[in-house]
Image (tube, rainbow, N blue to C red):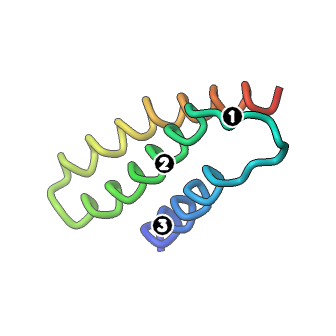
Amino acid sequence: MENLGYLMISAGTAAMAFIEPSPTRPDRWWWVTCLALSGGLVVIVATSFMSVAASDLALLAVGAVLAPAWVLVLTRRIA
């Protein structure tokens, strides 16, 4: 169930990369962070079937680096 949740969040984040709410210029960092977070979540699912160390490293990378970067870009985009 947890892996399915990660995959659903990954699909939603990837879809958000292509949503353009206004006719303003596209933000390159929005695309990069959305697709990086989406890919990171897929990596979490893939490493969940491997050793514990690989899974923990993937969770740490996504949770400590990619997710905060995505949140910062999201707040800049909303503002």
Q: Residue furthest left?
A: 51
Between 20 and 38, the one lying in front of the other is 20
Image position of 39 with respect to 33: above or below: below
Quadrant holding the C terminus: top right
Quarter of the image where one finds residue 12: bottom right
Please name the residue that numbered disc 2 is placed on.
Answer: 35
Look at 22% across and 67% down and name the residue there.
49
Q: Residue drawn at (82%, 47%), measured in percent from left and top?
A: 21
Residue corresponding to mark 3: 7
Say if 48 sits above or below 34 in the image: below
Residue annotated with mark 1: 74
Q: Residue at x 28, y 45 (%)?
A: 56
The percent position of residue 3, horizontal first and vertical second, equals 42, 68
Label 1 to label 3: alpha-carbon separation = 20 Å
Mark 1 neighbour class, 10 Å CA radius: few under 14, some 14 to 19, many 20 or more: some
- What type is the residue that disc 3 sits on? Leu
Indicate the amino acid at tag 1.
Answer: Leu
- For residue 54, the mark is none
- Give the SS element for disc 1: helix
Q: Secondary structure at mark 2?
A: helix
Q: Residue at x 69, y 34 (%)?
A: 74
- Nearest to N terminus: mark 1 or mark 3: 3
